[in-house]
Image (tube, grey):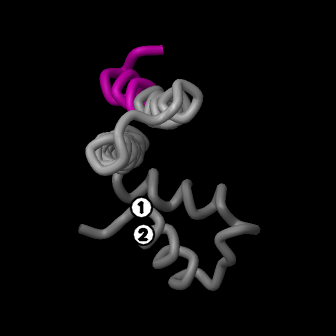
């Protein structure tokens, strides 16, 4: 599956743009091609995948080394929560909610 980062790189290359300088223009092209809701949903899926990876790493670490400190466990869970928040936003946009 092509990642959103790869799609942005392709648009930048096709138009002779630089991703850091022309990010808004790149996003406009992607929104025109796929629709804003589709782009938001794609980002949400990538974030959900990253969230699952963070939680999997926490589980594997606990299985290998025993439980982490409270601070370390909370850090992992906060990182995962950040990713789920972006998923919630994208889902609301896809549903047409304000």
Q: CA distance from mark 1 to mark 2?
A: 5 Å
Q: Nearer the viewer, residue 55 or 31?
A: 55
On the question of residue 76 being in view, the answer is yes
33 relative position to 19: left or right: left
Mark 2 closeness class: few <14, some 14–19, many ≥20 residues within 10 Å:
some
At x 58%, y 28%, the residue is 71
- For residue 35, say whether it is visible: no
Magenta segment range? 86-98
Mark number, residue 43: none
- 33 sits left or right of 70 in the view: left
Helix, strand or loop at label 1? It is helix
**Left or right of 71: which side holds 5?**
left
* Residue at which label 2 appears: 7
Q: Residue furthest front?
A: 66
Q: Main secondary structure of the magenta part?
A: helix
Residue 6 percent coordinates (x, y): 43, 72
Residue at image location 55% in from the left, 84% down from the top: 13
Asked if the magenta segment contains residue 71, the reply would be no
At which x and y percent is residue 60?
A: 29, 48
Q: Are marks 1 and 2 in contact (CB under 8 Å)?
A: yes
Q: Residue at x 37, y 42 (%)?
A: 58
Tag 2, which secondary structure? helix
- Numbered tag placed on residue 4 in the rendering: 1
Identified at 34% across, 53% down, the residue is 34
As drawn, the residue found furthest toward the right would be 21
């Amino acid at each position: 599956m092509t990642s959103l980062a790869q799609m942005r790189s392709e648009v930048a290359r096709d138009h002779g743009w630089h991703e850091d300088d022309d990010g808004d223009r790149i996003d406009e092209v992607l929104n025109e091609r796929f629709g804003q809701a589709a782009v938001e949903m794609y980002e949400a899926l990538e974030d959900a995948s990253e969230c699952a990876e963070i939680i999997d790493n926490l589980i594997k670490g606990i299985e290998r080394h025993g439980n982490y400190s409270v601070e370390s466990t909370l850090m992992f869970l906060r990182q995962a929560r950040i990713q789920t928040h972006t998923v919630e936003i994208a889902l609301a946009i896809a549903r047409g909610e304000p």
